Image: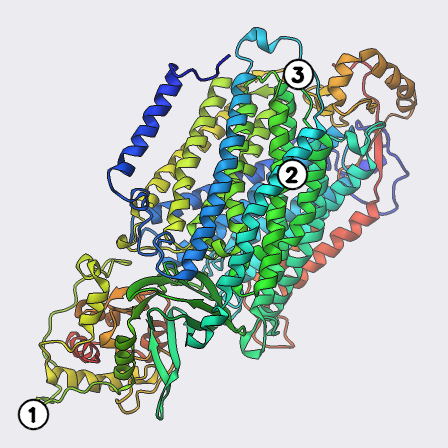
Amino acid sequence: MALFPLTSTFARRALAGFAALAVPLLSGCSWQSWLGLDGKQSTFQVEGPVARDQLQLFYITCYVTFAIFIIVGAILAYATLKFWAHSDADEHAEPPPQGHGNPLVEVGLIGAAVLALVVIAIPTLKGIWYTYDVPAESKADAYEVVATGYQWWFKFEYPKEQIAGAGPLTCANELVIPAGRPVRIALRSMDVMHSFWVPKLAGKVDMIPNRANFIWLKAEHPGYFWGQCAEFCGESHAVMRFRVVALGPQEFRDWVEHQAQPARSVAAAQGALSFAHVAAAPIRAYAPNEAGVSAAYETAPLDSWRARQLPNESEDPALIARGRALFSEKTCISCHTVRGVPGAMGITGPDLTHVGARSSIAGGLLENNSEQLRRWIHNPGAVKPGNKMWVTGYLVNNIHLASDEELALVAFLQSLK
Amino acid sequence: MADALAKPESPVGEAHAAPKALVLWRPEAKTGLISWLTTVDHKRIGFMYGVAALFFFLVGGVEALLIRLQLAVPNNNFLTAQQYNEMFTMHATTMIFLAVMPLSAAFFNFIMPLQIGARDVAFPRLNAFSFWVFLAGAVILNIGWFIHDGAPNGGWFGYTPLTTRGFSPSHSIDMWVMGLQLLGVASIAASLNFIVTILNMRAPGMTMMRLPVFTWMTLVTAFLVVLAFPAITIALIELMMDRLFGTNFFEVSNGGMPVLWTHLFWVFGHPEVYILILPAMGIISEILPTFARKPLFGYPIVVFSGACIGFLGFGVWSHHMFTTGMGTVATAAFSMTTMAIAVPTGVKIFNWIGTLWNGHLTMRTPMRFALGFIWLFMIGGFSGVMHAAAPADAQQHNSYFVVAHFHYVLIGGSLFALLAGIHYWFPLMFGRRVSEGWGKLSFWIIFVGFNVTFFPMHFLGLNGMPRRTFTYDPNMGWNTGNLIATVGAFILGVGVAVYFTVMIYTFFKGERTGSDPWDARTLEWSLPVPVPEYNYRVIPTVHARDAWWYEKRNKDEVARARAAHAPGEASHGIHMPFQSIYPLVSAVGILIGSIGVSVIDADPGPGLIGPKLAVTLAGLAVFLVGVYLWALEGNEGYHVHPEEDHP
C-alpha cells in the first residue's frame, strides 16, 4: 500500500504548503528576515569571527538534528498510520505477535546515534578552544578592555589609556573598540552576577564576583552593536543594556584622545549666572516602561553616534553653567565622576565626563536626547525600578528637581561631548 | 476516640498487639476529614498528592499566563518589574516542585505498589509524613503572596549573591530557602520509602527484570532524588546561614564564592531535570505497549537506558554553566557528557517506535498524549543537543531558545506524559473514564496551543531575546514572536481548562468502566475497581514480564500457583497498618518552625526570646512531640479477613 500517493489530498496539501513557504524565500527577502531573525541582537547576522564560529556550529547541529528528525519522524508517522487500528474489527482482532525486540536493530541504532553525535562533537571541540581566547597568532595585536557589571549598568575601562592623575580611561554603557582587531575584555562584577552579551559579535560570558572571567571578540568592520545583560541580576535586569561601537583604527585613536580630555566647559558670560528660578514647562507624563528610542535614530546608528560626538549647535551657556552648579549642589558629584568639574569624583555611578557624546543613557535603555535625559533624571525609579540613583540617592538625600533645574542639568550633561 | 485500643473487637479488626500503657489515639475513621488526615493508605496519599499537584499546576499556569500577558506587547506595564520577577520565580518553582514532582509522586504512590503486587509502601506513616511536609513546603513558598515581603523573586535557581541579604533583604528569599528545604525533606523521605518498597516488597516471581518500566523509572528517580537533593540541601543551608547568621559562604566582600552556589545548585539541578522526565518516560513505556497490544520493544535496553540517563545525569551539571568561564577542558568534558546522554534518550525513542511497529494501535486518549509526547520530546531533545555544543550554547544560554527547549521537554515531555497517565489510570483509580471525544478535543487544543506558544520562542532566543526580562523595546524584532506566544499560551490555557473540566465531570458523572478497560498488561489492572484498601486479597504470583497479560492467557497456571499459597494467607488474614495522626503532627511542627525561621523578623537582640525564636522553638517542640509519639505508638496494625468472593 502506497502511504501517500501523489494524488492524495494530504500530498497535495503538503506540496501547496511547501510552495507557500518557498514564495517569500524566492521573492528576495533573506530567510532570516522572513523568519524574523534579523533583529538588532540576531545571532544569525554576525559581524565577528567568534559569533561566526558559534553560528557555524549551530548550523551543524541543525543539519544533523533536522536529518535525524526527518528520518525518525517519518518512521514514527509511518508506524502510527500504518498500524493504526481504524475499525472496531481491527481493535478486537487477535493481538499482534508479542515480539520483545531485536538486539541487532537496537545496537545498530545506538551506533548510528553515536556517529551522528561525533559529527557534532568534533566542531564543538574545535569551537570550544577557538572561542575561548584570542588565537595565539593575533594575541599581540589584541586590545584590552575591562568591563565591570553593576546593578544595572556596565563600566568600561581602558587600561592602556592611562590619564594622568585619573587612572585608566573610563566610560559607561557604550564600549568603543577598534574594528578589525581582536579585543580581549576582562569581565568583572562588583555586586551580583551579570553576563556580557553582544550577540552579533560573540556569545555571552558571565561577570561573576570574585572570579576573573574574560571574553574575546572582534568586529570585522566599523559598526554599532546592541548588547544586553544575560544573567538575571535583580529588579531591573531587563533594562540593563549596552552598546558596542567599533571604529576604524584612526577614528578609534581620535576617540581615545578626545575621551582622555577633561569635560568640555562652555564659557558663560558672568551676568547670566543669576540662579533665579525661571518658570519652565513641566515634564510630560511617561507610562512605566515607555519606549525611549526613536526609529529615525536607528536607521544608521553609527552615523547617529558620530553626529553625537560634535557639540550641539545651539547651546545656552548660562543654562549650562547653572546645570554645572546644580550638578554639585544636588550631590550628583558624590556618585559621578566628571573630570574637570571640581569634586565630581564619585565612583558609585557611571563616569559622565563625556556623557553627552554617548548615544544612549540609563544603561543603554534610553536614547540620549534632552527629552529622555530629563525623563531619566526627573524620576530614575520610574525608568529603572530599584536603581541606586533613585533608592540610595534621590530618596535618601531627599533630592527634588524643579522643572527649570531639570532643564539646566540636562543642558549641562548634553554639553559634555 | 482515645479509647480505641480498649476495644479489641472494633470494626476494623483485631489489634495486632497489646495496648500500650500510654494513651495514644488510634484513629479509625474510614471516611470523613479525619480519615484523610490520618491515612497511611498509599492510594489515598497518592490521591492527595495528585489533588495538591493539580491545584499548584493551575496556580503555576495562571502565573505563566500573567507572564505572557506582560510580554504580549513591547513596553507593557501590566506587571511591575518586581511582580514580573516574582511571577517567573514562582512559576518555575511551582511547576517543578509543586506540580510535576508531586504529580509524579502521586503516580509513584498510587500505581507503583500495585504494579509490584504489594499491599502498601514499606513505611506507610513515613509516606504520610512526606506528603504533609511537602504541603508545608508548598505553604511556606507561597506565603509571600499574602504578606508584605512579597513572593520569592530571585529566580528558581536563586543565584548568589543576588539572593544574599545585601541584595535581597526581604524575607521572600528566606521563604524560598525554607520552602525548598522542606520539599527536599519530603522528597528524600518519600524516595527512600519507594526504594525500600521496590527492592523488598515485590510479589513472588516479580524479579527486577520483570518490573514494569514505570516501577523501574520510579526506582531510578528515587535514587536520583536521594543522591541529588543533598547538594541543594547543603547550598540552601549555606545560604540560610549567610542570611540569618552572617556567615560568608557567598558573601563576596568577605571572600565568599558565588560560583560555588552555581555548582552546588546544578549538581542538584540537572539530576532534577531527570527527576522530572524519567517518571514520564516510565508512563509512556506503560501506555504504548497497552495500546499497541504488544510488549515494549527492547525492555532490557529501555530499562538500562533509563538507569544510564540517571547515572549520566550526575555528570552534566556544568552544561548549565558553559558561560561561567570554566575553561576549555571542563567545558569540553561537560559538552561531551551532555552529548553522550542523547544516546540513551534516543534509544528510548527508537524503542517506543519499535513498540508501535507491527502493533494494533488503539487510538484512545492516553495513546494520543503518549504519541504527542514522543514528537514534542524529540524536538526538545534536539534543541538539547544544540545546547550541548558549548560554543553554540554561548549564544543560546539564558535566551528564549532555552525557554523553548525546556518547555518542550517539560511540557511536551513530562506534562504530556502525566496527562496521558491521568487518562490511562483514571479507570483504575475512580472506575470511570473520559469520553473519547472530549479527550481528543483537549489533546488537540493543548497540542496546538503548546506549539504555538513555545515554537516561536526558539526564534526569539536566536534573535537575541534574553530570558527573565519584564520588558523589551519595540525595535528589537521580538514583537511578533511574543504576540504569537501569548496567543498560544491562552490556547494552551483553554486546552488545560477543557482537560480539567472534563476530568472533574468524569470523576462525578463519567462512563463507568469495569476493571481492566484497556486490556492492559501490568499487574495493577488485575485489581477490582475501586481498589480495596488492602489491594490484593491474595498476593499475586508473577510468571512473566507483562504479568497480567500473561495471567489472562494462562489462567490455569496462575490460579494453581495462587491456590498454593492462598490458604496460608487466609489463615492469618491481611495485615494492615494502623492509621496515625503523628505524621501530620510532626509536619505541622515543621511548618510552625519554618514560619519562625523564614517569615518572622529577627529578634531585636541576643539573650531575649523574641517572637522569631519563640515560634521556631514552638515548632520544634511540636515536631519532637509528634516524632516521639510516632515512635511510641509503634508500627503495629490489625488484620482483616475479606470475603472470599470479592466482586
Q: What residue type is labelled 3?
A: Asp
Helix or strand or loop: what does disc 1 sit on?
helix
Circle 2 is placed at which residue position? A111
Residue B550 picture location, percent across and down = 76, 18
**Residue on which the image places disc 3:** B519
The one of A163 and B284 positioned closer to us in this rendering: A163
Instruction: Say whether residue B576 is left or right of residue A379.
Output: right
Q: Is residue B468 left or right of residue B38?
A: left
Q: Which badge, 1 or 2, is on the more N-terminal residue?
A: 2
In front here: A70 or B645?
Answer: A70
Q: Which mark is residue A124?
A: none
| Quarter-of-image position of residue B495 | top left
Report the residue marked by disc 1.
Answer: A271
Front position in the image: A331 or A5: A5
- Spot occupied by residue A181 in the image (x, y as percentages of width and height): 37, 71
Q: What residue type is labelled 1?
A: Gly
